[in-house]
Image (cartoon, grey):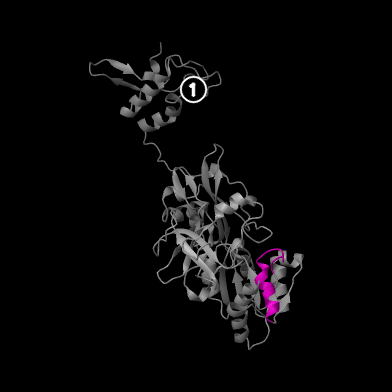
């Protein structure tokens, strides 16, 4: 706790107080004292600043909370990027009467649009804090005015940060690896969970003998000039059509669309159990979103397997009690509106074959059909075929042979062709018994 208090005193509160003429700051307590994120805010008391505590009804109502901050003339707020995005849309930094001069963000990734917007606020000093609970609150920090694009920054005093590959070897600058943290703030492990402790807290091969490091599960890369850049979660990768996809990467690009204020991209199973990407968007005030236009926007930047199959427009993204994105509360996506990517058949022959081929060239029940078969009479049907009749295949090989012959070349309109000897043969589905 002493180290956290010293860090916030030297890096956050004291520089801000000097810019305001040396007076004590008014700091809002925006987290429960049972949550480690509150420790930095409580540290304001140790440096002689005021701590203002909103009630639950005020904190959970964005409009009411903005009015409370203005009325109390609060100087410093510590929030998650998701909730600060909501407060910014409610005019937190555009109010004529008062606006905070310090913003501390943490708990989740800071999107690039919000990063740029906060950098442009006159008189605001914003900090991006990164650190899992296992490493005692904040381990890496950056001021937003230190970089044009989002970065995690540099390790705080007493902390070591490594970007390693799967063999625990350091990767070169610009190469993505897994982020490991070590130092004085590292906790001992998980209470009564030795297995998980051994999995996440491993020996530190680059520190003093006997020290350990924490495997964060976050991906990062180190820029050539030193700061760390967040690159997603190692365990958030999903496989879409055989390709590994990082939903956060798609989400980050989607938020750059001029009509999108907030976005979330998650993997969801469709009615057949296949994993697909689903996008949830909140448009900017006064704008409308067109799923087809958003899909086209992403197709110009990603391969097809990284483009979400469904787009859902929401008034606001759901948040957890800790003001992080509540992915479990997102509504079920509608995959039935997915736009087909195939081309229409070329008339007249292709169109005729396309209309009947799903019924002529497939075996719905493997070796035979059933009395409830949806097949109907088509130009390719056997003589006497009637809609709904149930004629079994002579063997499964007939289906395979039919498909092979179909691929060999397109059938004429009457689904017949001529052999080398001049004999006229019908399509294989007519050769029964």
Q: Is 240 or 35 nearer to us in this picture?
A: 35
Say which quadrant the N terminus sits in. bottom right
State whether residue 273 appears in this view: yes
> Percent x, y for residue 272?
54, 36
| Residue furthest top as drawn | 433
The residue identified by callout 1 is 376
Residue 37 within the segment the image draws in magenta: yes
Residue 271 within the segment the image draws in magenta: no
In the rendered image of this protein, does residue 303 appear above or below residue 128? above
Taking the spot 72% from the left edge, 69% from the top edge, the residue there is 64
Taking the spot 48% from the left edge, 53% from the top edge, the residue there is 246
Which secondary structure lies at badge 1? loop
Taking the spot 51% from the left edge, 76% from the top edge, the residue there is 145
Residue 69: image quadrant is bottom right
Number of numbered discs visible in the structure rendering? 1
In the rendered image of this protein, does residue 358 appear above or below residue 253? above
Which stretch is magenta? 30-47
In the rendered image of this protein, does residue 100 appear above or below residue 321? below
Is residue 68 toward the left or the right of residue 340 in the image? right
């Amino acid at each position: 706790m002493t180290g956290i208090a010293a860090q916030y005193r030297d890096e956050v509160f004291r520089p801000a107080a000097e810019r305001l003429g040396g007076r004590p700051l008014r700091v809002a307590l925006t987290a429960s004292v049972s949550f480690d994120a509150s420790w930095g805010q409580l540290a304001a008391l140790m440096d002689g600043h005021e701590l203002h505590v909103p009630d639950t009804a005020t904190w959970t109502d964005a409009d009411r909370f903005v009015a409370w901050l203005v009325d109390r003339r609060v100087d410093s707020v510590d929030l998650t990027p998701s909730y600060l995005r909501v407060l910014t849309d409610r005019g937190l930094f555009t109010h004529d009467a008062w606006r905070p001069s310090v913003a501390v963000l943490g708990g989740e990734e800071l999107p690039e649009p919000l990063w740029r917007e906060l950098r442009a606020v006159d008189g605001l000093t914003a900090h991006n804090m990164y650190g899992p609970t296992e490493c005692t609150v904040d381990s890496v920090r950056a001021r937003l005015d230190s970089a044009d694009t989002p970065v995690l920054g540099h390790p705080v005093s007493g902390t070591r940060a490594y970007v390693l590959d799967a063999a625990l070897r350091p990767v070169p600058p610009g190469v993505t690896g897994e982020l490991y943290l070590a130092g004085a703030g590292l906790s001992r492990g998980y209470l009564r969970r030795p297995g998980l402790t051994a999995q996440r807290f491993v020996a530190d091969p680059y520190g003093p003998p006997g020290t350990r490091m924490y495997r964060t599960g976050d991906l990062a890369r180190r820029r050539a000039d030193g700061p760390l850049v967040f690159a997603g979660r190692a365990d958030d990768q999903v496989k879409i059509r055989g390709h590994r996809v990082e939903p956060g990467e798609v989400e980050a690009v989607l938020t750059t669309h001029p009509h999108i204020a907030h976005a979330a991209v998650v993997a969801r199973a469709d009615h057949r159990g296949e994993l697909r990407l689903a996008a949830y968007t909140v448009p900017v005030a006064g704008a409308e979103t067109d799923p087809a236009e958003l899909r086209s926007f992403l197709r110009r930047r990603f391969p097809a397997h990284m483009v979400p199959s469904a787009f859902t427009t929401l008034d606001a993204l759901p948040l957890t009690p800790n003001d992080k994105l509540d992915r479990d509360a997102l509504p079920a996506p509608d995959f039935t509106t997915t736009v087909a990517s195939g081309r229409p058949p070329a008339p007249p022959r292709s169109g005729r074959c396309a209309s009947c081929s799903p019924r002529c060239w497939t075996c719905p029940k493997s070796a035979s059909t059933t009395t409830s078969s949806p097949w109907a009479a088509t130009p390719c049907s056997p003589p006497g075929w009637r809609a709904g009749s149930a004629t079994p295949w002579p063997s499964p090989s007939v289906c395979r042979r039919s498909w092979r012959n179909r691929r060999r070349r397109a059938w004429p309109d009457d689904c017949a062709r001529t052999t080398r000897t001049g004999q006229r043969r019908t399509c294989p589905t007519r050769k029964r018994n």
